[in-house]
Amino acid sequence: MRGRPETPSSRQVPQGAVLSSPVRVLLAAAQVSLALGILTADLWLPNSYSVANAYPLVILIGLRRGPRWVTLTFVGCALLLFAGWWFSADPMPALVVSVNRGLTAGILCVTAALVWRVEIVRMQLRARLADSVRNSELLERADERFRLALDSSTHSMILVDGTGRIVRVNALAEEVFGYAAEDLCGCAVEILVPERFRSKHGELRTLFLRAPSTRPMAVGRELFAVRKDGSEFPVEIILNLLETSDGTLVLAAIVDISARKRAEEEMHQMVEALPSGILVVDAKGTIVLANSLLNGLFRYAKDELIGKPIETLVPPRHVTGHPEKVSSFFAAPVPTFLGAGRTLYGMRKDGQEFPVEIGLNPIQTQYGPRVIAAVVDISARLRTQKELELAAEDLRRSNEELDAFAYIASHDLKAPLRAIESLSKWIEEDAAPVLPPKSRQHLETLTARVQRMRTLLDDLLEYSRAGRAEEGVADIDVRTLVQDVLDTLGPNPSFSVDILGELPSVRCSRSPLAQVFRNLIDNAIKHHDRPGGRVQIGGRPVGRDLAEFRVTDDGPGIPAEFRERVFRMFQTLKPRDEVEGSGMGLALVRKVVHRNGGTIRVENRSSQGSEFIFTWRRVPAREEVA
Amino acid sequence: LNSPVSNTAVKMVLIEDDAVDAESVDRALTKLKLSTPVLRFNDGKAAIEGLRAAGKDKVQRPYLILLDLNLPRMNGLEFLDELRADPLLRDNIVFVLTTSCDARDIREAYARNVAGYIVKARVEEGLLEAFKMLGRYGELVEFPREVTP
């Protein structure tokens, strides 16, 4: 706030008495001594001297002491006049004395009346003077307050008279426009209007005076003001009409809105840069802003949508009731997501529809409540979703076909195999006497191949079914499980299978894990390079969720280049005539382990043999969440 | 008057589409020196029609049905449904004789009240054992008879 400090009032309001008390006492003493002197002379001197005529002097001395004092001295003097007459020893004839005294009393009365009147008038004058002084002071204060009020305003204030002359400006206006107050006062207000608007401004000013109202000027249009140096800036102006004794004045409050404009501009840029279509809609459902992405989405040109109702973008069949939805949104504005559970459609300029998702967010702006709508075109997503669904359906169907195939492989392919086996056996039985040894041998090979084919089919079936166990989960003691597996494998005295230490317990279906151990142990024995050997089984928990098991043998080991290949289907490292096997065992193991969420790898032990290491979930994946 | 009748006349109704499998049944019976007559149908539909036939074509009781599951036209399970729905045939004793050891097949067959589910063994000895059992079964077990009017 700018302003001169208020000077303490130096002038006291004038009182009834002008004289200081010592002077008053002195004067009173002078009056009393004069009156007593006159009385003495009156008593001593003969009446013919008419000393008593000096009494009015006493009254005159009391001038400027107020009418009451005049009355008092008059009464005193009259008494003394009478006393002088009464006690006088003058033997003048009574008539003469009486006339003389009467004249004197008359003079005294007239004098007193005159002085009294003078005093009254003087007092009135003094009071009027005091009033006018006080008034001018009040006026000055009011003016000071007005100045302070103007200066303390955060707006530039300009007071203009009816003819458009600047009467007054506040300090901020001086600063903002770059003029001194003295330069502005008396000038036409158009000095602050950019040149190109000046002529128009005069007309508008006249119009305003004819139909005045307190309102922002030129709502919806952009106003500019010009500084002393010629630079322009955007403003907002509020006009106030002041009726004063000097005529109509207009007080204009001017706000520099450059910063706000800049902020708005930045906001626009941000909205432009957003990666989705952005709409701003007012409470009437009119579009007030649309970014270029949105315009692109709906195929409109820049600013083409501004001022249009939001229903422009809604397909005709959804327009009914839409304005009501807009109203109800503004009645209770909360952030809302539209399009969950159903597909919404937007309509392009050419009438084409496309699926959208819309997020609504209410905002408060200087212009009132608005809603920001973020519109996302979800055609691509819906398309992808559809493709995924189709792919999933395909996958499900092909899985079913695979199941059916596995069944056919187990039954329909095995049936002819059985027939071949039976027939060859019957030939062997029925034609035994006539069969040459070579044919007998061929029949044996035929049976062996049939057997191999059957194993392949069985293992293939088992592989396709792996992990689809229908049995429920249970807490499994792995040591018992391995023991059971060893029992089903049958005794093989030349091989020792040892379980080393404690095996971690797991919770799962029993048969997949048994299958893994059975195949790994079977594999270790079958592919051993010597007729006897050792298989060791160990395990340890890995973290909270996994258990790790190892099946270690002292066989030939697996060369590094084959360590991946052994897990593939139908892969064997030796001719099938040497080691019967479908090549499915390890593929099956890997599939089961993977299905359970584990991994498997094979390593060579430093000395000899190989070690299969696999991990196994300790708790089924489905139960983990619970 | 219902005097107990010997089961020596128990026939086997074999429902089997594979000629080799049918022959292996014959061979097994021959090897076991059983003279049980075998009446063969190629599929479920032929069998149900044959069993429903009247007059001189009528299959006389008592008989034991040996049923394969995987059959053309009407498979074994469908045949069982049809059989159990027929008031005249529903009481028949059926053994499933199949190559399928699918758990679902076994469950479904027993759900239709079969007397036993026999998986055809790979080797002939297994089949012989099965027929030894079936022969004894036919001798020991009372079969449902024709209702004499």
Image: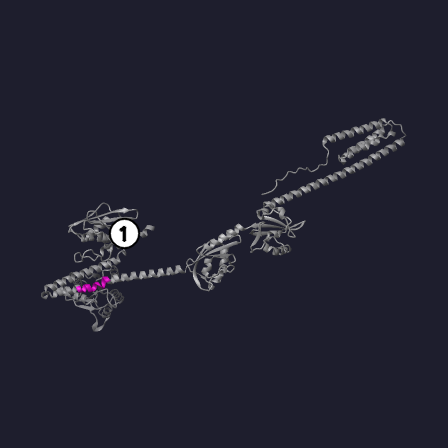
Residue A37 screen position, x and y as percent: 81, 27
What is the span of residues highlighted in magenta in the rendered image?
A409-420
Which image quarter holds the N terminus of chain A?
top right
Residue A78 screen position, x and y as percent: 82, 32
- Furthest-front residue in view? A229
In the foreground, A180 or A262: A180
Residue B100 screen position, x and y as percent: 22, 61
Chain to which the residue tagged by mark 1 belongs: A
The answer to whether residue A246 shows anywhere in this view is yes
Left or right: A25 in relation to A363? right
Give the answer, above or below, for where A577 lies relative to B74.
above
Left or right: A360 in relation to B148? right
Disc 1 crowd rating (10 Å Cα; few below 14, some 14-19, many 20+) is some
Residue at screen point 54% across, 51% down? A257
- Furthest-left residue in view? A433
Would you say the magenta stretch is mainly helix, strand or loop? Answer: helix
Left or right: A464 in relation to A334? left
As for residue A480 lying within the magenta part, the answer is: no
In the foreground, B106 or A188: A188
User: How many numbered callouts?
Assistant: 1
The answer to whether residue B142 shows anywhere in this view is no
Q: Which residue is mark 1?
A: A599
Residue A413 screen position, x and y as percent: 22, 63
- Find numbered disc 1 in the image and state the secondary structure of the residue it sits on: loop
Residue at screen point 72% across, 32% down? A20
Give the answer, above or below, for where B142 lies relative to A372.
below
As for residue A413 lying within the magenta part, the answer is: yes
Q: For the residue marked with disc 1, what is the amino acid?
A: Thr
Q: Quadrant of residue A467?
A: bottom left
